[in-house]
């Protein structure tokens, strides 16, 4: 079942992303490159916060996971062994009327007749398999011998480096190898903003285990991953776990869940969690002729480990964070008149800018100097934005629109002009409640330490 779509809301989100510098179309001034996106100053901060938090939870806070960073250019033998060269394809259909290339599952059906979703044309080709991998050539020659691929998933370099990492990390099963990085797929029809792109990032964990632990660990990782999304501000009520039916699962998988989110354009996959058995390591062992076995010292057993893989999309999660955060409410303007406020209610953990700092007046050197002192105090701990231009209400609005959770105003009370007891205090405003409290400048690092944790 799909949640209702909301085209208008999505249009507003796409427009905000461009207006405020979250996401731009790639090569925009040349007409754009379909399926590729550039992250602007705020988008890159949001994306980094997401990846850093994933790495913190998945690698740094655990004893049983180590990281790696593999190359994007991939030896064809790796992708032959994994099955990608032969089978990483989608069925494609062409519309002879409007010449569109379509994924077979995108056709619409009216009165039992398949039609093109663009022009309604019924003159369609038979489906044919289209391999989604980007091929390139390494070195000066451009023949068969120089073919390499841009990796279609980060996972394969983890499998290929399994033995090296096992040796250097001296981990015992169960243990995992994590990786965050780019992946490339020549999607037939990129769509829904960044949701389906041709270049995207993944956050993948391959968690190796004994065969009898696989099903239990699949459940364990499903729960861990749901907690992760809640920790970054996506409520459980908007997340759905789909048990992928037997006939849709990869033949080697004994169980797969998709974690889905209610995007404005419908319920769609954020992450797959798959119990991939020993398929990948066995394939690479067979094709390379190198042992990828594990020796269990206690049981005195040698075997190829099984693996459970939580595989999440960075760009899809960024999009979910923006969609979830986007809201409009009513707030008073400078003259007390109510106006519509656009606010991104990001969880402080992922917000691109944590705090705005504003001197009440830009032409008062004392206020400006004090505000800059506050910036210098906070900058080692968090991203801070200093803004002195325009009315204070406007400055708050600009920060609300990019999801800054806190705003600090340095005013005449900070200078101790009205009441010396208030010297070196500032107002701290909360984005969501718009409530303001008076706090001492020296207490700010501790306050933020607690509220941004
Ligand atoms: N290693 C397993 C794997 O790659 P997948 O379901 O094909 O599994 C995992 O991809 C995740 O990568 C997806 O859940 C999605 O978040 C992200 N992803 C896949 N294709 C994507 C695309 N074309 N654009 C953006 N994200 C994509």
Image (tube, grey):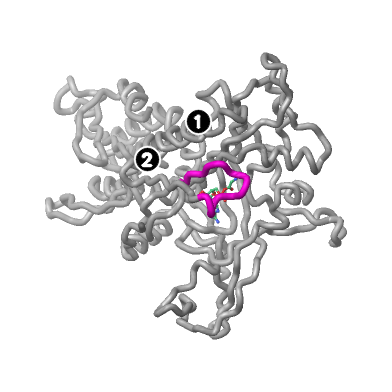
Question: Residue 48: x and y, percent?
Answer: 50, 40
Q: Determine the residue positioned at 20% across, 28% down.
A: 438
Q: Is disc 1 surrounded by few (<14), some (14 to 19) or many (20+) residues within 10 Å?
A: few
- Position of 208 relative to 259 (above/below): above
The magenta segment: 246-258
In the displayed orientation, state which residue is furthest to the top: 298
The residue wearing badge 1 is: 216
Q: Secondary structure at mark 1?
A: helix
Q: Where's the N terminus, which quadrant? A: bottom left
Please tell me the numbered disc located at residue 386.
2
Residue 257 is a magenta residue: yes
Q: Is residue 201 visible?
A: yes
Question: Residue 191: x and y, percent?
Answer: 49, 63
Query: Which quarter of the picture shows residue 65?
Result: top right
User: Is 83 on the left or on the right of 223, as rendered?
Assistant: right
Q: Where's the C terminus, which quadrant? A: top left
User: Is 122 on the left or on the right of 367, as rendered?
Assistant: right
Residue 46 is a magenta residue: no
Q: Nearer the viewer, residue 170 or 31?
A: 170
Question: Residue 168: x and y, percent?
Answer: 72, 23
Q: Is disc 2 surrounded by few (<14), some (14 to 19) or many (20+) residues within 10 Å?
A: some
Q: Secondary structure at mark 2?
A: strand
Q: Determine the residue positioned at 63% across, 44% down.
A: 154
User: Is 107 on the left or on the right of 347, as rendered?
Assistant: right
User: Is 367 on the left or on the right of 52, as rendered?
Assistant: left
């Amino acid at each position: 079942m799909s949640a209702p779509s909301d085209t208008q809301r999505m249009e507003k989100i796409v427009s905000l992303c461009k207006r405020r510098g979250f996401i731009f179309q790639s090569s925009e001034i040349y007409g754009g490159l379909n399926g590729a996106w550039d992250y602007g100053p705020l988008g890159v901060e949001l994306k980094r916060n997401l990846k850093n938090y994933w790495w913190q939870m998945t690698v740094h806070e655990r004893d049983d996971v180590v990281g790696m960073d593999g190359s994007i250019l991939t030896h064809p033998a790796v992708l032959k062994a994994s099955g990608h060269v032969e089978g990483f394809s989608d069925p494609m259909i062409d519309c002879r009327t409007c010449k569109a290339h379509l994924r077979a599952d995108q056709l619409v059906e009216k009165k039992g007749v398949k039609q093109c979703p663009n022009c309604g044309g019924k003159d369609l080709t038979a489906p044919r398999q289209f391999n989604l991998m980007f091929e390139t050539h390494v070195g000066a020659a451009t023949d068969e011998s120089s073919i390499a691929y841009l990796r279609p998933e980060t996972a394969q370099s983890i499998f290929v480096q399994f033995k090296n990492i096992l040796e250097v990390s001296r981990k015992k099963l169960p243990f995992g190898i994590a990786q965050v990085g780019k992946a490339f797929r020549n999607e037939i029809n990129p769509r829904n903003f960044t949701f389906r792109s041709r270049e995207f990032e993944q956050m993948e964990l391959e968690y190796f285990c004994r065969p009898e632990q696989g099903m239990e660990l699949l459940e364990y990782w499903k729960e861990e991953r749901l907690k992760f999304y809640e920790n970054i501000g996506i409520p459980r009520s908007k997340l759905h776990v789909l048990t992928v039916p037997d006939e849709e699962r990869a033949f080697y998988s004994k169980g797969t869940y998709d974690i889905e989110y209610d995007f404005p354009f419908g319920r769609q996959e954020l992450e797959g969690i798959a119990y991939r058995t020993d398929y990948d390591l066995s394939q690479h062992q067979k094709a390379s002729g190198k042992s990828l076995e594990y020796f269990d010292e206690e049981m005195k057993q040698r075997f190829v480990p099984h693996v459970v893989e939580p595989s999440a999309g960075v760009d899809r999660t960024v999009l979910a964070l923006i969609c979830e955060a986007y809201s409009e409410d009513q707030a008073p303007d400078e003259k007390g008149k109510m106006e519509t406020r656009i606010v991104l209610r990001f969880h402080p953990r992922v917000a691109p800018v944590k705090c705005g700092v504003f001197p009440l007046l830009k032409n008062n050197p004392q206020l400006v100097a004090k505000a800059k002192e506050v910036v210098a105090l906070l900058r080692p701990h968090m991203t801070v934005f200093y803004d002195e231009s325009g009315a204070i209400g406007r400055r708050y609005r600009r920060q609300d629109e990019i999801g800054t959770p806190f705003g600090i105003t340095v005013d005449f009370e900070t200078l101790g002009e009205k009441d010396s007891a208030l010297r070196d205090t500032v107002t701290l405003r909360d984005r969501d409640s718009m409530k303001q409290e008076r706090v001492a400048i020296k207490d700010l690092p501790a306050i933020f330490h607690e509220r941004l944790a």
